[in-house]
């Protein structure tokens, strides 16, 4: 994103723009691509998503008061952009980290990634390397079969639709080999329908992970199937349940300023809440609302039945 036009007073308009050099979208299909479950004809033979990505993106952007636009030329590529007007903030320092969610550590476990999409493959490699795993990545089931036999991974993460050999066929071949029968194989797909999951499990997959891949779900699967120990959390002194409930409510409605103000008052009242407040502040300033909700829910008590 970049300022467009220059900042004016207390607000700034940022333009977020993504360009590609792909196959492009025909003019008569440009408006339709924002409909749920719609895929332009040119896309269908190249992409394997659910057709929801652009519809969801447009909805989220509209909730922020903007619209998503596209210009495209067949066989040349497309440009997507939106302009978002935001208030100017103070220069807070924020250090990106795993935050209060417990990260797993790879302990040199070997993970084989089988994925033909360059972006998804690179994302998985980075996520896994950051967790301390040894990672090998290949681009189709045929290469995955060869690499699995020569490298003996502890777990295999495989896409389903790939050239030469798909993930399901690769899994069937691997399960016929005695040394591969105990290896965890996780199917990864944007098609999260029950029929697809059942087909994967019937072929011999151990688990199913939906795209887009989220780190907490990936961590859960790795922890479960590799028997990894999560990094112990430091002890947190928690505020009263009424304060936890109030913070949870503010997180649900996404009121970042109110959350920051609330935890500041908590620490002023009792400095023992400092570590807890630090975790909440880190997630709030990073706009990681989903993780903040999950973090707070771990400490909330269920209401007593009347």
Image (spheres, rainbow, N blue to C red):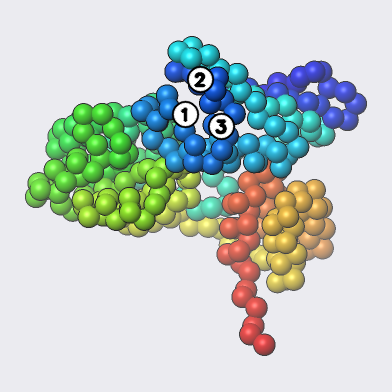
| Residue positioned 58% across, 64% down in the render | 298
| Residue positioned 44% across, 18% down in the render | 23
On-image quarter of the C terminus:
bottom right
Give percent across and percent down for residue 17.
Answer: 63, 22
Give percent across and percent down for residue 54.
Answer: 56, 35
Dot placed on the residue nearer the N-terminal end, 3 or 1: 3
Residue 17 seen in the current view: yes
Marks 2 & 3, CB-CB < 8 Å contact: no
Taking 75 as reference, is 28 above or below it?
below
Marks 3 & 1, CB-CB < 8 Å contact: yes
Mark 1 burial class by Cα count in 10 Å: few <14, some 14-19, many 20+: some
- Given residues 193 and 228, the one toward you in this image is 193
Marks 1 & 2, CB-CB < 8 Å contact: yes
Q: Please state if 109 lies on the left or on the right of 302 as rendered.
A: left
Mark 2 — residue? 26
- Given residues 62 and 221, the one toward you in this image is 62
Mark 1 — residue? 40
Dot placed on the residue nearer the N-terminal end, 2 or 3: 2
Q: Please state if 211 lies on the left or on the right of 35 as rendered.
A: left
Q: Secondary structure at mark 3?
A: helix
């Amino acid at each position: 994103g970049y300022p467009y036009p220059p900042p004016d007073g207390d607000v700034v308009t940022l333009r977020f723009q993504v360009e590609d050099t792909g196959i492009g979208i025909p003019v008569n299909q440009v408006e339709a691509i924002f409909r749920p479950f719609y895929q332009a004809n040119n896309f269908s033979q190249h992409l394997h998503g659910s057709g929801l990505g652009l519809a969801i993106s447009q909805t989220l952007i509209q909730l922020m008061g903007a619209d998503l636009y596209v210009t495209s030329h067949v066989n040349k590529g497309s440009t997507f952009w939106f302009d978002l007007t935001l208030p100017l903030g103070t220069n807070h320092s924020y250090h990106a980290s795993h935050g209060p969610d417990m990260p797993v550590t790879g302990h040199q476990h070997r993970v084989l990634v089988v994925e033909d999409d360059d972006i998804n493959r690179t994302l998985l490699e980075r996520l896994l390397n950051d967790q301390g795993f040894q990672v090998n990545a290949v681009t189709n089931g045929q290469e995955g079969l060869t690499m699995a036999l020569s490298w003996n991974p502890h777990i295999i993460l495989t896409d389903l639709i790939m050239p030469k050999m798909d993930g399901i066929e690769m899994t069937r071949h691997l399960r016929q080999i005695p040394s591969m029968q105990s290896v965890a194989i996780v199917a990864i797909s944007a098609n999260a329908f029950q029929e697809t999951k059942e087909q994967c499990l019937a072929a011999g997959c151990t688990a199913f992970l939906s795209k887009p891949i989220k780190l907490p779900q990936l961590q859960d699967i790795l922890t479960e199937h590799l028997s990894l120990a999560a990094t112990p959390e430091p002890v947190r002194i928690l505020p009263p349940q009424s304060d936890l409930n109030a913070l949870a409510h503010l997180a649900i409605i996404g009121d970042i300023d109110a959350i920051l103000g609330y935890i500041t008052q908590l620490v002023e009242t009792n400095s023992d809440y400092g570590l807890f407040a630090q975790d909440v502040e880190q997630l709030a300033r990073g706009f990681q609302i989903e993780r903040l909700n999950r973090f707070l829910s771990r400490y909330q008590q269920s209401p007593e039945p009347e």
